[in-house]
Each structure stands twice: as structure tokens, then as C-alpha cells.
Image (tube, rainbow, N blue to C red):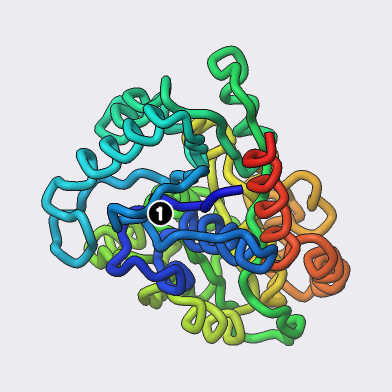
Amino acid sequence: MGDVAWLVSNVKTNDHQELWNTELASSRMRAGVCISGCLNAGLPVLPLNYRDPSHDPALVFMAKYVPDSNTGQFLDDSGARWAFWLEKVQKLHAKGKQLVIDYTDNHFTNPNIVGDFYRTIRPMVTAMVVPSTRMARHLEGSWDKPLEIIPEPVEVALQPVRRYNGGERIALWFGHNSNLPYLFEFMRTGMKEAPPDRLVILTNHILKDVVQAAANQGPKGLQITLAKWSVETMLKAAAACHYAIVPSNTEDARKNGASPGRLLTSLAMGLPVVATPLESYLPFADYFAQIGSPEATEVMRNPAVHADRIEPAQALIEAQYTVQAIGAQWAAYARRLMSA
């Protein structure tokens, strides 16, 4: 049947295990989960970016292309990644093998180096995987090849419901720093309706001056705790917070096709959630309060009002959104492609 491989940005080694600690959720929760699922299903998977000349994959998945950071901390820094990936894609295409893009942001419309790379390789792409029906719709009329929808799982074990009993209210926000503008806008606007006493921000790249500038435009007296994201840090923070906020923008075509990963993760950690109603969140509308609604203001004032929403949400997560369940979807998809 042949080997499966992944092209993944911003890794320091070729070891699959590194994916479970990467800051890029799109690599951790998609490439990592796919590889785990394939290995569990008995499909052979090559080391990341399949660098050995003897490696000859039948199927290659491409994670989010990230331009070189020029920090020297990752493989292919200093401008090497474009040429390295493009050569692999061209060779794969020449051999008649399959390249599948894991399309988590609407890259084709980006007028920058990322969009340029996607547009360059587009004729050589066999199929695409997207995390949501909204992202699939972004491609209607411009993509006539196979398209698969595979959501992201929840990567944390289910935690006890976090119950608010009065006193200080602490809100949690976590995510890649590309999502910070949505948080900052919420701090300037909707958060002022019922501000928390403290906001915990966990992200991959800490920009203290930028966060402080946003705080200065936010609710008066808001205290901010800023820390680097990791699964361990996130779980520890969730145990001390009373609710999570997940602001976004339903009109932003680059991000509004996101999967419900951060919403479901917040619920899995036992937290009531106030979130922007992205399309992928709507199937879970019973479990969170929509930003801009009176219900959201009520939750921010008293998170206890949503305590009874958590356990039903966690039951759904346990049934359908575990790493094992979503990994099995990826493995079935890979087997189907290689059997075609």
C-alpha cells in the first residue's frame, strides 16, 4: 500500500513525538493525530519531512506552511523551507504520487509569501482536508478536486467542572498569537460589559508591550497574567480560572473556518465558555454563551450559571472528539486514498 509521510513546519527534529509539544495547534492536533491514528491502524509512516533519499512515500500530507522564522531554532530556517518543500512536491507529482493539503486557514487568498506558496503548488495537489464545513465552503467554485472534512480532537483529559462560588473572577484565553487581535478587540469592546478581575493569556510568542497596549484600552483595573502556552500550563491555569473566552470574527475568511478545537478544549477543562459563534461552534450552541448576547454578559458576571452545561458537553467530547476517535478518521481516509 505504501508509506505515509507529513511535511511539517517549525520542527526541530524528524521525530513524530515532537509534534505533541509543538506550539502550532494545526501541526499538533492534526499531523500528530493523523500519524498516531495511522500507526495504530498499522499504516507505515515515515519520519517527519522524509529526509532520507531512500524515502519514497505513496501519500504525503502537508501541514500549514510557515515561512522560515530565521531564528535558527527550527529545521530549514534561514529561507530554506520554500525550496526544500517545493522540490519534494515536484518530485512527488512527477512520480504520480499523492499530495494532500491539510487546509486549516484560507491560505490561497493570502496576498503574502504563504499564499504564494499555496498558489505555486496548487496544480500538483491531489486533495485537501479541511477542519470544518465553513472552510469547505470557502473553496466552493475554486476547488474541483476531492475534499475531506476532519475536525480536531480534544487533546486533554476531561477535568472536573470548575465551579464559581463568588469572589474574584478569573478568565482564561489561550491560543496561537495569530488569534490575539480578536482577543484585543474583545477587550476594547464586549469585555467591558462585565470585565473579569483577572485575565490569563497563554500563547506561543509573548509580546508584552502589545498585550499591555491592548490592556490599556480594555476594562479599567483589569489585571493580566501572561505566560507561554503548553498543555501543562493550560491545565494548571484552567484549574485556577472560572471561565474561558474564545473571541473571533465570523466575517474573517482566513479564520472563520476554524474547527471547534478551542471551544471543546475549554469545555473539556471544565470551564464555562463565552465565544464568538463561528459556524463550527454552532452544533455546540447549547454548551456556550455567544459573545454579544445577554447570556454571555450573565456568564461573565457569574460563571456559575453555566456550570450545568459542562458535563453534557464533556459526554459528547468523550464519545466523538478524542484523539483516538479522530485519529481513526485520519487513518481510514489515508487507507482509502492509497487503495483508490
Q: Quadrant of residue 319?
A: bottom right
Residue 321: x and y in percent read 74, 62
Quarter of image, res 236: bottom right
Q: Quick check: 329 above or below 235?
A: above
Image vertical order of residue 115 relative to residue 55, above or below: above
Q: Position of residue 33 (x, y in %)?
A: 59, 62
- Position of 4 with respect to 216 (left or right) is right
Q: Amino acid at mark 1?
A: Leu
Q: Residue at x 41, y 31 (%)?
A: 95
Q: Which residue is mark 1?
A: 180
> In the rendered image, which quarter contains the C terminus?
top right
89 displayed left or right of 77: right
User: Which quarter of the picture shows residue 295?
Assistant: bottom right
Q: Is residue 122 positioned above or below 105 on the image?
A: above
Element under label 1?
Answer: helix
Q: Residue at x 84, y 54 (%)?
A: 286
Q: Nearer the viewer, residue 13 or 257?
A: 13
Crowd tier of the residue under label 1, counting other residues whose Cα lies within 10 Å: few below 14, some 14–19, many 20 or above:
many
Image coords of residue 303 (percent x, y):
72, 72
- Residue at screen point 58% across, 86% down: 240
Query: Is residue 194 among what the camera can see?
Result: no
Give the residue drawn at x 34%, y 29%. 115
**Count of marks placed on residues:** 1
Near-viewer residue (253 or 170): 253
- 211 up-or-down from 164: above or below: above
Q: Residue furthest top?
A: 141
The answer to whether residue 15 is seen in the rendering is yes
Left-right relation of 177 to 161: left
